[in-house]
Amino acid sequence: MDMDTPRMGFFTDTSVCIGCKACEVACKEWNLVPEDGLNLTGMSYDNTVGLSADTWRHVAFIEQRKPVENPDALAMAAGGDLQWLMASDVCKHCTHAGCLDVCPTGSLFRTEFGTVVVQEDICNGCGYCVPACPYGVIDRREEDGRAWKCTLCYDRISGGQEPACAKACPTDSIQFGPLDELRERAALRVSELQGAGVTEARLYGEDPTDGVGGDGAFFLLLAEPEVYGLPPDPVVPTRDLGTMWRQVGLAALTAVAGVALAFGVGR
Amino acid sequence: MGVRRWIEGWPVYRQATQGDLLGRGAAAKSDGSARIEARTHSADRVVKSICPYCAVGCGQQIYVKDEKVVQIEGDPDSPVSRGRLCPKGSASKQLVTGSARTNKVLYRRPHGTDWEQLDLDTAMDMIADRVLKSRRDGWQWEVDGKRTRRTLGVASLGGATLDNEENYLLKKLFTALGAIQIENQARI
Amino acid sequence: MAECHPVGFQWVMEAKARGAKVIHVDPRFTRTSAMADLHVPLRAGTDIAFLGALVNHVLTEEKYFREYMVAYTNAAAIVGEDFVDTEDLDGVFSGLDPESRNYDVNTWQYEGTEVQAASGERDLEYEDKVSSAGRGEAHGSGGAAVDQPETDKTLQHPRCVFQILKRHFARYTPETVEQICGIPPDKFRQVAELLTANSGRDRTTAFVYSVGWTQHTVGVQYIRTASILQSLLGNMGRPGGGILALRGHASIQGSTDIPTLFNILPGYIPMPHAHGNEDLDKFIEAESVDKGFWAEMRSYLVSMLKSWWGPAARADNDFCFDYLPRLTGSHSTYETVMAQLAGDCKGYFVLGENPAVGSSNAKLQRLGMAELDWLVVRDFSLIESATWWKDGPEIDSGELRTEDIGTEVFFMPAAAHTEKDGSFTNTQRMLQWHHQAVEPPGDARSELWFTYHLGRIIREKLAGSTDEADRPILDLTWDYPCKGAIAEPDAEAVLAEINGFGPDGKPLSSYLELKDDGSTMCGCWIYCGVYADGENQAARRKPGAHQSWVAPEWGWAWPANRRILYNRASADPDGKPWSERKTLVWWDAEERKWKGHDVPDFVPDKAPDYQPPEGARGAEALSGTDAFVMQADGKAWLYAPAGLTDGPLPTHYEPQDSPFENLLYQQQRNPVRQVKPFKHPDNRMHPIGSDVFPYVATTYRLTEHHTAGGMSRWLPYLSELQPEMFCEVSPELAAERGLEHMGWATIVTARGAIEARVMVTERMTPLTVQGRQLHQVGLPYHWGPNGYSVGDAANELASISLDPNTHIQEVKALSCDVRPGRRPTGKARLELVREYQRRAGITEDTGMEP
């Protein structure tokens, strides 16, 4: 990574998401992502279902009854405990990115912004990256077989612009910026919400010690991650790759030494 | 391509020389990625506009390249919208450049079962003739003995998606023709 | 608001972050409710009962802002002895003529004053017709005429507005709210407390509404109730206050200001009605007022006539006033449909609108079009209004046969906003210019091009005509400069004409410069100033971040670039801001002028203690505390002595089609609603409380689509987000009717039957109304059979029954039935509707009573 470019990312604050889906459309318009099919799902207002090769931003809608903890009159009103959660999901741009680790062609690479991007001029459609993603984000496009996902608008941010989704977002639910700053802002927001009695407010993916080394795109959620369809404890499948390679390396060295010894002895 | 550049382009060389020993960063950057440029940057011009959907009036910037609209996004200068757009506003490029637009005049003759093509100038001339005939047929100098100087033969509907200047000409022309049944979406 | 105006909603979120409480009143739990502190579901069509109880609460608990109320409203005005309230006439006001279904508004007047319309030579027949044409809207930027009333500042006089108000709203209690609206008293009290605690010197509350309030047979009175509430609480003309209408089309405000509407001319000048021997002087005498800015109506109208007919408009020919066609009653879009069915209207332009989906009783719209000689549809794609003759629902049902339809149809492709110059007026009266980016493709043209060249060709064809009927078109000023390969008219030249020119040919800068002698020209007086100094003020784009929070140098707002109307009321009678926090404009005693963050909405040097001299007229006749400068008496009206057709005070009436009786009065429905002119076999009404139609349907929009779909259903990126028509029902209703989530439902009224996929959701709440459980059905109205994303149109279900002031249809509350499964097709669809009509005992007279 370029040392003078800070790592950039997304902080998606779902507590102010109004579920308008501007992010989905702005992403598609900018990145020329194809339409994903007409499918009325009945999953509340979510007719996109999930992230895929043809959907790089996905707004989840969850209708649920909130257990009444707060006897505050406002929350108590009849039916007032109905909660409609909305959250815009996106590629996490992991610190330890499984997709990137397994990509045999060098198509997936880490940019100077610390983001993880598929280079479509390299990708040969092998699909190794697909099962390597602990979030099920990266996906192959049926028409051309190549893998596609959010680039965090690599072209836009290279020119100093913010990603299309963050720019469009009417309520600033999607925030773009240096990851350090976003983490600070997010911590502040969580304590603010908790102070206001929103005890369910929590961050997801901001912890550098988690199974993917922290996400470049992290979230403020108002319920358990599973509620939003997010894995509670994602682990990069290649987490132990380094250790494995070290062992492989050691074994190889041993083998080489053995062979050399044999040759040496043979002489 | 010179040998030097060829060698420098070799990923293994780049891995070794650019500090990207694992070959997953700069060393893996493709030619395509190196050339990448936002089309908002490469556009020939940016035109200030306003979103055509609802009446909030969000600012838009239209990016034009080779006389084609290549991107529409929010105008950060707008005190109304601060650069933001809703899904409809964000879909404006598809609205104006999409294949769903019908860009030819179509004509259905009386009792016809399908569309036919028609030249724009011919259509304008035919419409003018029909306006004059229906205006004449529905003309009323008086109603119940009171002067009305009008026609009920011609009516018009629509205006809320149009510009003020367009509504002005519509009201002016149709009123001068004596038409009174001039309406728009204000009621729906 | 989050649902339909997401980008505007950012400011609500901003306010919320600063501690504002958000209350959302809506039958459904929407994306707005999800963000609100309090969601108040209510039975659709009962808002006056709810808002009226808030008025009652404010009055009985003395929560009003007394100083503001006494100074700036007509609370102290004394009403004439002849006025009889709904309290004493069981739901109707004095003056009702049940035969003609009109009110004689004379008895509603202030004591000792005369109603405007009684002046001059007007006869009763004329008044009947005028009334049915809806004069309320003709005063869109001001009130109707009244003289200065007698007042009692102690508010004790039994006939003062304040006392009348108290009596009128006394029966609107939390208990009636519970019975009528289905809102529990606890919840009602929460709203009342939040609202009143947040109103006064230091705090203001804003009301935001959309068509959920207007689309009723009593829509105007919904907004009136909110106006009363806001005036009592002192929330008008102040920052953070007001009543904000959110409108759904880019320039729907502009198309009302410069109206493509039948009953008004540019700037809300009424269209003249047919009347014996009426000339310009008599028209002005009858229509204008003595006080306030409407007193100068003659200058506004003469300047408009000069810009239309130029040199032909002279003082000796009444400036061509006779060239204006005359109305005889209402000629709204719905009367036009009836005129088409009757064979009177033979040619129809449909310009960027889709009545075959978007208008109430969509079927009647199509049947009307099938009677035309010709139809011109201008749009981006082949919308339903362009193709009904070959694939509309009536072709499927066999009611129409393509080969039998004689209508000639022209589809003319339209240019997009990126392909033309022009201005939109947004929902806050602000004009913003959009610049052309590229040329329109193929045959696509702007309406500016279409209208200008159509007029040019017509004038060429009529050249030399000696027919007097052709004079207005031949004398018309119609010589706009054109540019480019397609000869596009110069939109700025049109804007300049709208702005107007002085005697020296230079652009005017204010409507105060307009003269009634023909020396000035101005296409729309309220827009005068938009081209001041020869500059396109609507195209101003000083970044918001580089100017004050009012952002006066972005675009241009009418009138006179004011952003908050009646802002004189933001200061106390002495001219000092009511509080530091809520400062907007103030009187600078040293410089002896009004100053402010916004342009003061007051004569700049009129001191707070100014008293008009005897015999003063126009703006001069308003005192230094008459903050509501467009009103003839300078006051905010708690009681409307004139200007409305259906009562001086809001009254709860049940919707045209309601499953309930009116609990408050014997009078069931608005007695002067417009329904009788629309008696038609395909526009039948429901009996009161019919168990054949036990549910209430309400129509609405979704974030992902736009109105009747012409600009969204064809777009893949929007269609995939909401791919087809669905209805929203509660789990309880689903159980009651055997509806399956994502299965099909058929919704039936006396007008039609549509099918929709079923969305079972707890966001729909059954309510307890008059002791029984009421289910409501949510129906997005975007869909139709054409386009990429398709479905039945909700407007097939709605009737033509209208608000008498605005001619707006009641699509927000209609009783209906819901049954599982898809609707029948072909002839059977029609038979299903007929069967429902028979079961409910519906005749042509059902629901037609006053």
Image (spheres, coloured by chain):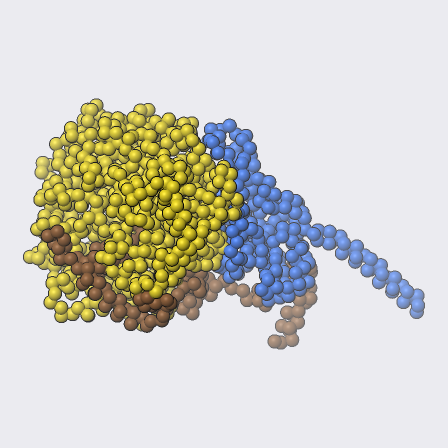
Q: Is residue A126 above or below residue C235?
A: below
Quadrant, the C terminus of chain A: bottom right
Which of the image's four quarters has the N terminus of chain A? bottom right
At 90% from the left edge and 67% from the top edge, which residue is drawn? A263
Look at the image and tell me whether residue C221 can be seen: no
Which quarter of the figure has residue C651? top left
Give the chain ID for the brown colour: B
Judge from the rendering whether residue C615 lies leftward or rightward of residue B9; answer left or right: left
Kindly give the residue lying farthest to the left in the view shown: C316
x and y, in percent, of residue C90 in the image: 25, 29
Q: Residue furthest toward the bottom?
A: B2
Q: Nearer the viewer, residue B69 or C220?
A: C220
Q: Residue at x 33, y 56 (%)?
A: C366
Residue C737 percent location from the top left of the image: 48, 40
Residue C88 on image: x %, y %: 23, 27
Foreground: A77 or A74? Answer: A77
Residue C323 lies left or right of residue A50; in this view the side is: left
C566 sits to left or right of A248 = left
Chain A, hue in figure: blue
Q: Is residue C296 above or below residue C413?
A: above
Residue situated in front as seen by the camera: C443 or C769 = C769
Kindly tell me whether residue C750 is visible in this rendering. Answer: yes
Q: Residue at x 55, y 55 (%)?
A: A56
Q: Quick one: which chain is yellow?
A: C
Q: Residue at x 24, y 55 (%)?
A: C342
The image quadrant of residue B118 is bottom left
Q: Nearer the viewer, residue C214 or C749?
A: C749
Percent of width and height locating residue C521 = 17, 57
